[in-house]
């Protein structure tokens, strides 16, 4: 009987962002032989700078809190949503009047497995570097500046990761592969699994400003450390405001592709023209100093026909991305690594890397991302409904649960069902006071409900 040569590694991970680094840390900590291939050289700038509290469970598992505190990332205690004018939301639903300024603190709901009342805003360049270095310290092999060309699943008993180092083509063998390549979706493209979202087509233009006065929209000084989501009186358009340091604040405009200016000069003008629809923000921001070039991001929204297969699994943005509205990107990346690592370690122990081995992960992550998708769809369809639910004591804690990132344990959270039903009621009644406030972006998402 011919003895099979052992593979170079147990698991090959494509991508060293939060998903790949967290996965490498989980596996290496458990004793697996892991390699990470990262295309970029860290640190590098990256969008997605605000976390949600469900990330805390991962930080605790991996022993990261001391490093996060040493990095002095701003603590994030809550979130706020503001609208252009009180008049925009002057009429309530069923006798209730939502505020044009809705705020939540994470400590309002006790969160299982989370032992602090804050999470973080982060400079992604430093944050991602910290995570990748941590994975290396736990025993993962890490190679930066490596371009993965693809994975061969047919050549022998193992998966073969093919990559270039400089101009030299190389390869390594692994028992299985984890695709954590972000929006590059290496396996999604190779296996033709990637599907563009039929509803969302959002684009963003963003930058950093120094010395922006965050106290302007804080109430009695409370809220300067919040993420702010500002509704803009432009169809399906909003603005994020995220503290990066005491002096630096990230701003980004998110809008539909059809609204997005094509020429570089026009994009910057578009950024300012859009923010000018909110004079309270525009006047203060114009006094600040831009400290980074403008950057745009597109083609946000997509899914995969499958996220697991024989000898592979997809995590983070490589598996799914919808929209950045609720700061879900890093949370999904970290939690997908947390869930997936359990199935991967079990597969390594049993020596079984068939698709069924990863069924628990796939079921869990699809359930969670579907709940995020429904929540985001409600927000875009009727902004006022979101602020109404946040402000209504009957629903507030259930909404905070979603905003904390706890979306994986229920097939259909009751609060989302109620939101969808209210949207349907407003859609069907052309005389409803909120009917004219409906946005068109996610209208198709609600057609099956009536």
Image: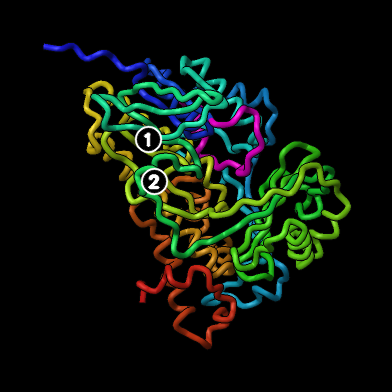
Q: Is residue 420 above or below residue 173?
A: below
| Disc 2 and disc 1 in contact, CB within 8 angstroms | yes
Q: Is residue 189 visible?
A: yes
Q: Is residue 75 above or below residue 173?
A: below
* Residue at mark 1: 339
Residue 145 as seen in the image, left or right of residue 45: left
Q: Is residue 110 visible?
A: no
The earlier-in-sequence mark between 2 and 1 is: 1
Q: Nearer the viewer, residue 89 or 155?
A: 155
How many other residues sit within 10 Å of disc 1, few (<14), some (14-19) or many (≥20)? Answer: some
* Residue extent of the magenta highlight: 39-61
Judged from the image, the secondary structure of the residue bearing numbered disc 1 is helix
The answer to whether residue 57 is magenta is: yes
Judged from the image, the secondary structure of the residue bearing numbered disc 2 is loop
Based on the displayed image, in which of its 4 quarters is residue 246 positioned? top right
* Residue 426, horizontal then vertical, whole percent: 49, 78
Residue 15 as seen in the image, left or right of residue 225: left
* Residue at mark 2: 408
Magenta-drawn stretch, dominant element (helix, strand or loop): loop
Based on the displayed image, in which of its 4 quarters is residue 32 positioned? top left
How many other residues sit within 10 Å of disc 2, few (<14), some (14-19) or many (≥20)? Answer: many
């Amino acid at each position: 009987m011919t003895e099979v040569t052992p593979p170079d590694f147990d698991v090959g991970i494509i991508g060293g962002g939060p998903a790949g680094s967290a996965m490498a840390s989980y596996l290496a900590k458990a004793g697996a032989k892991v390699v990470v291939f990262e295309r970029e050289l860290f640190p590098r700038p990256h969008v997605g700078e605000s976390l949600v509290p469900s990330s805390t469970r991962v930080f605790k598992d991996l022993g990261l809190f001391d490093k996060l505190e040493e990095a002095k990332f701003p603590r994030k205690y809550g979130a706020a949503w503001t609208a252009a004018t009180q008049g925009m939301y002057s009429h309530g639903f069923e006798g209730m009047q939502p505020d044009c300024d809705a705020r939540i603190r994470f400590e309002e709901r006790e969160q299982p497995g989370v032992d602090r009342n804050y999470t973080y805003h982060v400079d992604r360049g430093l944050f991602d570097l910290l995570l990748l270095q941590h994975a290396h310290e736990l025993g993962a092999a890490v190679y930066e500046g490596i371009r993965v060309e693809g994975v061969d699943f047919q050549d022998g008993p193992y998966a073969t990761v093919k990559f270039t180092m400089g101009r030299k083509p190389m390869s390594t063998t692994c028992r299985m592969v984890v695709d954590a390549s972000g929006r590059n979706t290496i396996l999604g493209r190779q296996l033709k699994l990637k599907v563009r979202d039929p509803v969302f087509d959002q684009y963003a233009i963003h930058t950093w400003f120094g010395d922006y006065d965050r106290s302007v929209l804080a109430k009695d000084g409370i809220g300067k450390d919040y993420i702010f989501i500002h509704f803009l009186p432009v169809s399906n358009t909003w603005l994020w405001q995220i503290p990066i340091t005491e002096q630096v604040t990230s701003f980004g405009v998110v809008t539909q592709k059809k609204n997005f200016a094509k020429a570089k000069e026009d994009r910057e003008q578009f950024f300012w023209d859009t923010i000018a629809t909110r004079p309270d923000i525009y006047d203060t921001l114009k006094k600040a100093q831009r400290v980074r070039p403008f950057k745009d991001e597109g083609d946000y929204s997509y899914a995969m026909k499958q996220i697991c297969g024989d000898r592979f699994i997809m995590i983070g943005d490589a598996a799914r991305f919808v929209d950045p509205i609720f700061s879900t990107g890093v949370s999904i990346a970290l939690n997908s690594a947390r869930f997936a690592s359990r199935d991967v370690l079990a597969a390594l122990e049993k020596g079984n890397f068939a698709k069924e081995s990863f069924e628990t992960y796939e079921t869990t992550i699809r359930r969670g991302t579907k709940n995020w998708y429904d929540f985001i769809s409600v927000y875009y369809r009727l902004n006022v409904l979101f602020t109404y639910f946040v402000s209504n004591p009957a629903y507030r804690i259930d909404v905070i649960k979603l905003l904390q990132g706890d979306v994986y344990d229920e097939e259909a959270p009751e609060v989302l069902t109620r939101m969808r039903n209210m949207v349907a009621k407003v859609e069907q009644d052309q005389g409803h006071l909120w009917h004219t406030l409906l946005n068109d972006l996610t209208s198709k998402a609600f057609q099956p409900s009536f």
